[in-house]
Image (spheres, helix red, strand yellow):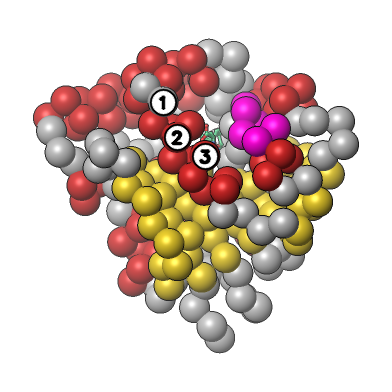
């Protein structure tokens, strides 16, 4: 997986806006508004990091770990990040060792890169966490056009980003079955772009 998104990094934001309009940004605006004022936040698969200025505006005192498998994405994210923002850059495609070290986890359009088995391994071994998740929800397609857009994106990322799956994992369904407790939810008008803030099950 490491660096598989390097090739598309420069075009990623423009492409996602062209295909999904502003939905990817709008759903993350909502999540960011609910971030805590301080604490440790792990951003999984943060992409170009275009959300970083907004996170800084909302929560300037957050300590952020930005974990990303693509070195080119990390370079772009460094440019977006305001100079005073406290960010640790982690170039890795292994998230397991970092999850237990953070109280807040942010995963936007990241879980759709994982298999359902991988999503099943996400729960931390100790402590309680709050997860901020945004993704496509395969339980709520409203039209054939939406299915076609997702299939075209999957094919595109298979060709240019080595994407391994042929369908969307049911990420929200898995989190719910694993006992994650939804605290707040937001479904856009398009229905299949969904966001939830969840608490991990207590041990
Ligand atoms: C679909 S993009 C989403 C980017 C960003 N979160 C957004 O909402 O625009 C997924 C990102 O996750 C990264 N990624 C995929 N699998 C990963 C892994 N196992 N570990 C770290 N990053 C990963 C990719 O490099 C890519 O930048």
Q: Percent from the top left, x then y, of residue 16?
A: 43, 22
Q: Secondary structure at mark 1?
A: loop
Looking at the image, residue 161 lies above or below residue 173: above
- Which range is magenta? 48-54
Query: Which residue position holds label 2?
Result: 26
Alpha-carbon distance for marks 1 and 2? Answer: 6 Å
Q: Secondary structure at mark 3?
A: helix
Alpha-carbon distance for marks 3 and 2? Answer: 5 Å
Query: Which residue position holds label 1?
Result: 22
Residue 29: which disc? 3
- Residue extending farthest to the bottom is 203
Q: Are marks 1 and 2 in contact (CB under 8 Å)?
A: yes
Q: Quadrant of residue 159?
A: top left
| Mark toward the start of the polypeptide (3 vs 1) | 1
Q: Is residue 49 magenta?
A: yes
- Residue extending farthest to the left is 144
């Amino acid at each position: 997986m490491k660096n598989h998104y390097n090739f598309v990094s420069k075009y990623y934001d423009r492409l996602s806006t062209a295909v999904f309009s502003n939905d990817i940004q709008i759903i993350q605006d909502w999540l960011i508004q609910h971030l805590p004022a301080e604490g440790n936040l792990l951003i999984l698969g943060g992409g170009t990091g275009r959300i970083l200025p907004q996170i800084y505006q909302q929560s300037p005192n957050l300590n952020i770990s930005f974990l990303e498998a693509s070195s080119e994405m990390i370079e772009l994210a460094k440019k977006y990040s305001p100079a005073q923002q406290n960010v640790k850059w982690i170039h890795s495609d292994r998230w397991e060792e970092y999850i237990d070290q953070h109280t807040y986890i942010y995963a936007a359009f990241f879980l759709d890169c994982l298999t359902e088995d991988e999503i099943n391994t996400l729960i931390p071994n100790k402590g309680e966490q709050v997860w901020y998740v945004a993704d496509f929800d395969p339980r709520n397609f409203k039209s054939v056009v939406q299915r076609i857009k997702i299939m075209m994106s999957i094919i595109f990322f298979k060709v240019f980003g080595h994407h391994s799956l042929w369908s969307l994992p049911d990420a929200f369904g898995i989190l719910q079955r694993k006992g994650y407790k939804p605290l707040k939810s937001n479904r856009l008008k398009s229905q299949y772009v969904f966001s939830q803030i969840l608490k991990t099950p207590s041990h």
